[in-house]
Amino acid sequence: MLGLDPSAATLADPIATSLAVASWATVIALPPAIALGWLLARREFFGKALVSALLFAPMVLPPVVTGLLLLRLLGRHGPLGPALAQLGLSIPFSFAAAVVAATVVGLPLLVMSVRAAFAAVDPRYDALAATLGDGAWARFRRVVLPLSWPGIVGGAVLMFARALGEFGATIMLAGDSDDARTIAIAIYALFDDPRQQPEVARLAGASVLLSLVALVAYERFVRWQRRRLEWDDGA
Amino acid sequence: MSAPAIALQLQLFDGRRRVELDAPQGRVVVVGPSGAGKSTLLRAIAGIEPRARGRIAIDGQPWLDSDAGVCVPAPARAVGYVPQDARLFPHVRVRDNLLWAGRAEPGACGRVAAALGIEHLLDRMPRHLSGGERQRVALGRALLSRARLLALDEPFAALDRPLRRAVLAVVLDHLARERTALVLVTHDERELDGLDALVHAM
């Protein structure tokens, strides 16, 4: 129903396409965001400032510029173009392009949430688990990850909402292709056609509704996190 | 007192203070005013005080020897550490806190929980526990980790007098049964009858 299969997204309802793009982008972004969030929260390394600048750039750059850079990078004549072509992949102007654009633009939000969630875990829990015999990986798996999980899920919801509304980078990298016609792209393509006004209104309404649902879900996750991590109050 | 003692020796300094202990019978009660560095000492023994300098040896084996560059990491020391705030893992039930180290013998969890009077709390989440209940769960978790050394930071602070006696009896029983050294920090060394320990004032 979410149209997670890209081929099924051909000529699909833009609402389904948007949900599919945002879902794929969030799922793809989660593993690197957890790794990057952990590195930024818990480790000092050479080039940390540069890594975070590059990572967070899509949050402050105009999305159109991000899209343009991605197009130059992934296009047929870009640095990654020949390698992608050898793999039989052509990213621009496809469903994958919309996913790549939403991933790159949404990733900083997710990494920021993950970093904050990891940083909020009291290091004394980590130390305690160490005295009980847990090595670094066991502590990450048994202590750090479960205690920051609500923050990670909250970040994923925020990223999903941001990916749902992505326009600038998507129009540059994916254009208005049939299988990448998201809500935002469809509205842009149809808004000055008098016959399409009911469709434009439907898509705009769906967009408002989905954003609200995502933000309410985010609020709930934040509250859940506070409740789960509350501990010192009662001690 | 069947099990042979685990000897504990340490010389620690942190720039301001120097602590020297030689406890061949492996039982030490550390007393002193707050701010004297008692909790820091326990963290150094547990291996979670990165600034610790000096020497710690248990059973003749070095855990820390700054001059020789030896520092056995905390997971390999596996000290039965009870922090002063009796911190429990907030995301798992009392039972899973007790069994966290995964080294308890079958049936030991129920026996220890009954002895500490916390068997009715096993399925609760830590945030629903009182301070005294948390303290007993934290102690039970340390006992069930089958550590070679118990490092207890004010383990009776949140307990009233009868409970304090009962919990001390559980610790004494554990020491009689298992081959375990003990370092207990307290600001009040009274009511430690039966604990035949070296008293070290800081």
Image (tube, rainbow, N blue to C red):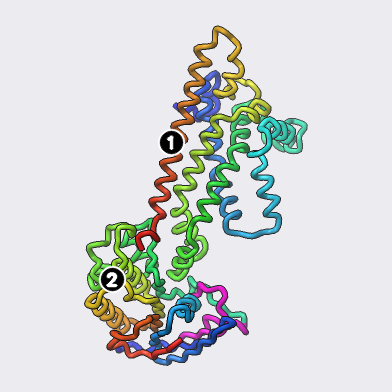
Q: Magenta residues, as a range?
A: B46-68
Res B164 quadrant in image = bottom left
- According to the picture, the residue beneath numbered tag 1 turns out to be A216
Q: Is residue A119 magenta?
A: no
Q: Is residue A50 above or below residue B51?
A: above
Location of the C terminus of chain A (image quadrant): bottom left
The answer to whether B160 appears left or right of A134 in the picture is: left
Query: Can you give x and y, in whole percent of width and height, for residue A116 in the image?
Result: 53, 51
Is the residue marked by circle 2 packed among few (<14), some (14-19), or many (20+) residues within 10 Å?
some
SS category of the residue bearing label 1: helix
Which amino acid type corresponds to the residue marked 2 in the rendered image?
Ala
Q: Residue A46 location in percent, x, y?
A: 70, 58
Quarter holding the N terminus of chain A is top left
Q: Estimate the x, y position of residue B101 in percent, counting from the top left.
A: 39, 67
Residue at image mark 2:
B108
Gap in angstroms between the C-alphas marked 2 and 1:
46 Å
Residue type indicated by callout 1: Val
